[in-house]
Image (cartoon, rainbow, N blue to C red):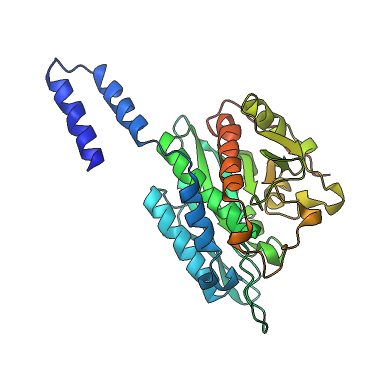
Amino acid sequence: MKKTILFFTGLLALTSCKTTKEEKPVLAQHVAVQKQYEIDSLTVKKHLYTLASDEMEGRKAGTEGIEKAAQYIEKEFERIGLTTYKDLTSYRQSFEHKGANMFNVIGVLEGSSKKDEFVVVSAHYDHLGMKKSGDDKIYNGADDDASGVAAVLTLAEYFKSRGTERTVLFVAFTAEEMGLVGSKHFGKDVNPTDFVAGINIEMIGKTSSYGPKTAWLTGFDRSDFGKIIQKNLEGTGYKLYPDPYPKFNLFFRSDNASLARLGIPSHTFSTGPIDKDPHYHKVTDEASTLNVSNITETIKAIALGTTTIINGTDTPTRVVVE
């Protein structure tokens, strides 16, 4: 009803004077501004608690639980208005791995002036599944990585409401926990020269070791991607730092690595206190242990920090993987 009122209000205003070709874009721009989605904690919480619920049974690749998660992501992509990837007839990029049927979930937001240049916004939607015994058997994977998928869905809605110059692929990768299986399969089917950047998001539900309103980036020194983000965040109060855990080799342990090995400047945003997280890969990694405000603020920072890349103003240098 609100959209209808906005439309007819604009129409009545135009009928009071002569309509010219110059006036039409002004009306379209006004209506578009009214529709812009602003990132909010209620939407983030809905995505997080749904994906990390017991109903999803730990989202292990190849199980009924991950099927439920995939259906939720697909419905959100459809609601937002994303299209399918290449010649796929659905949002699923299906393949077989060790006798199991698996699928990445991909939604596309086509760009305008640079639609043949691609940016990937991703997170893995799988986790560890269920234990065979115990009072709590479900590895809910709230921080790892329902928080990242919540970010992908929220960013999809954010950028869809604004439009982009480059084409953005919003991807939920499967089987990351089995060795980056989904992202490796995705990487087999791309022309690296067409891909400008990979924006991967993992474990953003807790305050980072750098303090509140901070995140860190894997492989910071391997391209100027991180410096672009830092520049765009100046004056916001939110700061991005290099990965504080070099001994863990995290740049190669998340889905960004599958694209980075192709030369694409692909990095992972995180706030995870890896060395001091009692819930990592435990059944206690539940949504109630996370800070929804932290997730929301980090998503806002990623949105602002990456906007110049997504809209074609900045192009990161190719990544160094040696």
At 67% across and 61% down in the image, what residue appears?
Answer: 176
Examine the rendering and report whether any part of residue 110 can be seen.
no
Quadrant for the N terminus in the image: top left
- Describe residue 172's horizontal placement relative to residue 274 as left or right: left
Residue 263's quadrant in the figure? Answer: top right
Residue 266's quadrant in the figure? Answer: top right
Tally of marks: 0
Q: Is residue 210 above or below residue 68?
A: above
Examine the rendering and report whether any part of residue 158 can be seen.
yes
Residue 96 percent across, percent down from the top left: 59, 70
Q: Is residue 84 above or below residue 312?
A: below
At 51% across and 53% down in the image, what residue appears?
Answer: 45
Q: Residue furthest left?
A: 16
Quadrant for the C terminus in the image: top right
- Describe residue 65's horizontal placement relative to residue 24 as left or right: right
Residue 236 percent across, percent down from the top left: 61, 28
Residue 300's quadrant in the figure? Answer: top right
Q: Residue furthest right?
A: 247
Q: Is residue 167 above or below residue 85?
A: above
Q: Nearer the viewer, residue 95 or 142?
A: 142
Q: Nearer the viewer, residue 177 or 132?
A: 132
At 58% across and 41% down in the image, what residue appears?
Answer: 297
Q: Residue furthest bottom?
A: 133
Residue 284 percent across, percent down from the top left: 67, 67
Residue 130 percent across, percent down from the top left: 63, 76
